[in-house]
Image (cartoon, grey):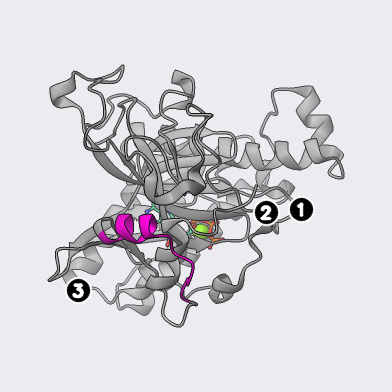
Amino acid sequence: MPRFPDSPTSALIHAASKGGKQHDKRSADAEQRAAGRSSVTREDLEGPYPGALDTDWSGVDAFSTPERDVDHDPSEGAQHDPTQPGPGQRWSTWRSVAKGQRGPDPLPEWVVTRDAAIDTELGILKTGKEADAFLVERAVPAGASSDGGPDLALDQAATRCLLVAKRYRSLEHGQFHRGSEYTEGRTVRRTRDQRAMEDRKSAWGRAVSATQWADAEFVALREAWSAGAPVPYPVQIDGTEVLMEFIGTEETDDLGRTQAVAAPRLTRVRPSDDLLESYWEQLTHGMSVLARLGFAHGDLSPYNILADGERLVIIDLPQVVDLAANPFSSDVLLRDCRTVCDWFTARGLDVDADALFADLLAQAF
Ligand SMILES: Nc1ncnc2c1ncn2[C@@H]1O[C@H](COP(=O)(O)OP(=O)(O)OP(=O)(O)O)[C@@H](O)[C@H]1O
Ligand SMILES: [Mg+2]
């Protein structure tokens, strides 16, 4: 699916990234919208995939043409009605997915559920091996009709929230490194899907695979969030796209412009001794919650933990491993324990990976 070349999103991505190319074809409309909206700071590009800016975008899904207004041409730019989706926008997908594809109750009050809401793609947070994470604003434009959405009364309904859209790529474009070590013991419900996955040459097989990683992440987030683990709230899943709570802050500059700043990964922070200890407690609490649910994270490292001020948030859960059913689960859990303990030990906290491993196993069984 092609990206909108002149969308406010792409303009913002490049404007916000140091050394990135400026977009010279911004429409007046995009300029205007960009001025009043959040932009994304890509301060967190270090890590295992620093070449993300040069990524081939051909496999990345972007917002498609709005469905409800078939006569509207998004390329008309400056003339477009702000209550209708324009370039780089779509109608909120909240209502277009079934209830089971939305996040767990109780629904946090910041989640925008109104029909009149429009999703605007604000920029890319990071490209990964299998998926790309985008910043999305879901907001009810001024002048939109008054509907409260199905879940909340109008006067309580939120009108704007920031979300992360994690979009899984098909095998063709992703570099799926997670193999049977992770999926062992997991049941694939539809035998047709099973056959398709075995035949990875078929387009259906590739699509199913990407959908299943998205599904796996959504289900893991839902269970973990409901059980009290520090993970982003999973707002909804739609095919290969998981929408979740944005972990970060919004900052306003002297000109009144807001900028969304994603929380840094743990690798990038140097916490004080007290905060380091608090981080350790939060992390081990999160790992314990997962263990009691019968999961190991499976790819836990300081790259998949965000430091949001004083709180830690564990992300990137598609590969969660079933501790009871997966024959490799002990190895995976021990590796998670060692990886995180190495980081804390290097920062001066006296922690023991084997003790943590034993403790988590005891909680799981
Ligand atoms: N909910 C979120 N809030 C803020 N930032 C996020 C969120 N989810 C992901 N990110 C950012 O996007 C990056 C990639 O997300 P994630 O680790 O889930 O995807 P990935 O495809 O597995 O990436 P990688 O291959 O780098 O591990 C994260 O390191 C983080 O910087
Ligand atoms: Mg990751």
Q: Quadrant of residue 109?
A: top left
**In the drawing, what numbered circle is on residue 273?**
3
Q: Residue 140: in sight, yes or no?
A: yes
User: Residue 335 location, x and y as percent?
Assistant: 55, 60
Q: Nearer the viewer, residue 159 or 189?
A: 159
Residue 334 belongs to magenta span: no
Q: Residue 310: in sight, yes or no?
A: no
| Three-letter amino acid code of the residue under disc 1 | Glu
Residue 322 vertical placement versus 120 (above, below): above
Label 1 element class: loop
Q: Which residues are magenta?
A: 22-35
Q: Please report contact status of discs 3 and 2: CB closer than 8 Å, yes or no.
A: no
| Three-letter amino acid code of the residue under disc 2 | Gly
**In the drawing, what numbered circle is on residue 59?**
2
Q: Please report contact status of discs 1 and 2: CB closer than 8 Å, yes or no.
A: yes
Residue 35 vertical placement versus 2 (above, below): below
Label 3 element class: helix
User: Residue 90 location, x and y as percent?
Assistant: 45, 38
Among the two numbered marks 3 and 1 on one chain, the one whose residue lies closer to the N terminus: 1
User: Residue 214 location, x and y as percent?
Assistant: 57, 40
- Residue marked by disc 1: 172
User: Residue 359 location, x and y as percent?
Assistant: 40, 49
Q: Quadrant of residue 117?
A: top left
| Three-letter amino acid code of the residue under disc 3 | Asp
